[in-house]
Image (cartoon, helix red, strand yellow):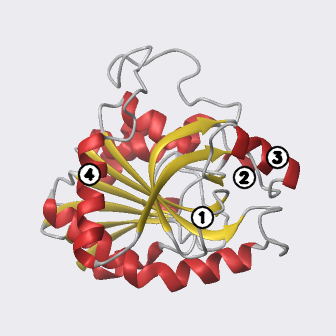
Amino acid sequence: MYREAAKYIRGKIDITPDVGLILGSGLSNIANLIDKPIIVNYDDIPNFPLSTVEGHEGRFVIGKLGGRNVIIMQGRFHYYEGYDPDQIVLPVRVMGILGVNTLIITNAAGGINPEFKLGDFMLINDHINLSGINPLRGKNDKLLGTRFPDMTNAYDGDLREKMQSTAAELGISMREGVYAIMLGPSYETPAEIRMLRLIGADAVGMSTVPEVIAAVHCGMKVVGLSCITNMAAGILDLPLSHKEVIHTANRANDLLKDLIVNFIESL
């Protein structure tokens, strides 16, 4: 199904994208920087699911950004929406077939590390998969990758260093830490957050990890970036809401746009 989807998209574009971006909740404004973008809506692509979450537009935006050919996902898919792992990572595999070798993944995350504050960016250096799912379960497609991919350096060290130096040049404070995935869509309980903190998580969310696994399996280099849009349950005495997540992410958009564009220019 990913080959059919890639064939459809290839028929709509006249460039070969080598950088892919997945934009998290409220972080989609980067796509507005593309000059003369080619828009491909998910509902027009064969075999593609639809994004149902507020803040996810549900389309690819393809064109030039930072001097590179890019393909941007405005809207991703989550297990809690009812999709299978294969559907969640379908866009990643499609991007790989189209020529993407560097994948930038962003998300909106809850801060667990007490030193974090709302609006911080956290460069992901590792993850903890507590979702109970893995997109590689089942028969392995050898054309995509090996049966047992090594996840030791899932978040490429050179790309992390480049992202840190780009942030420093722009005067943007960049945290670094471990991202944990929980299934959602309910937010975590205070007890679950205490557990996550004990096992080494700095931030928590409901996405990203399946996409990273699939990207590494396809041979892509990955860099991951979380925007801390809320403090996780029990960290602050405040209720959690998706509306607040979107609001905080929107405020961080201008900084994120500068960071991503300059990072891509440095590749």
Residue contact at pointers 3 and 2, CB within 8 angstroms:
no
Q: What element carries label 4?
A: helix
The mark that comes first in sequence, 2 or 4, is: 2
* Residue 43 placement (x, y as % from top left): 53, 61
Question: As drawn, is 241 to the left or to the right of 191?
Answer: left
The mark that comes first in sequence, 4 or 1, is: 1
How would you rate the neighbour count of disc 2 (Cα within 10 Å): few for under 14, some for 14-19, many for 20 or more?
some
Kindly report the distance in space between the C-alpha atoms of the residues bearing marks 3 and 2: 21 Å
The mark that comes first in sequence, 1 or 3, is: 1
Kindly report the distance in space between the C-alpha atoms of the residues bearing marks 3 and 4: 31 Å
Q: What element carries label 2?
A: helix
How would you rate the neighbour count of disc 1 (Cα within 10 Å): few for under 14, some for 14-19, many for 20 or more?
few
Number of the label disc, if any, that sits on residue 192: 3
Q: Say which residue label 4 marks.
A: 161
Does 3 appear above or below 23? Answer: above
Q: Say which residue label 1 marks.
A: 115
Which-is-in-front pick, marks 2 and 1?
A: 1
* Residue 64 placement (x, y as % from top left): 18, 70
Number of the label disc, if any, that sits on residue 169: none
Kindly report the distance in space between the C-alpha atoms of the residues bearing marks 4 and 1: 21 Å
Question: As drawn, is 73 to the left or to the right of 221?
Answer: right
Q: Residue at x 58, y 21 (%)?
A: 137
Q: Say which residue label 2 marks.
A: 81
Q: Is mark 1 on a helix, strand or loop?
A: loop
Q: What element carries label 3?
A: helix
Which-is-in-front pick, marks 4 and 1?
A: 1
Quarter of the C terminus within the rendering: bottom left
Q: Which residue is drawn at 23% across and 55% down?
A: 162
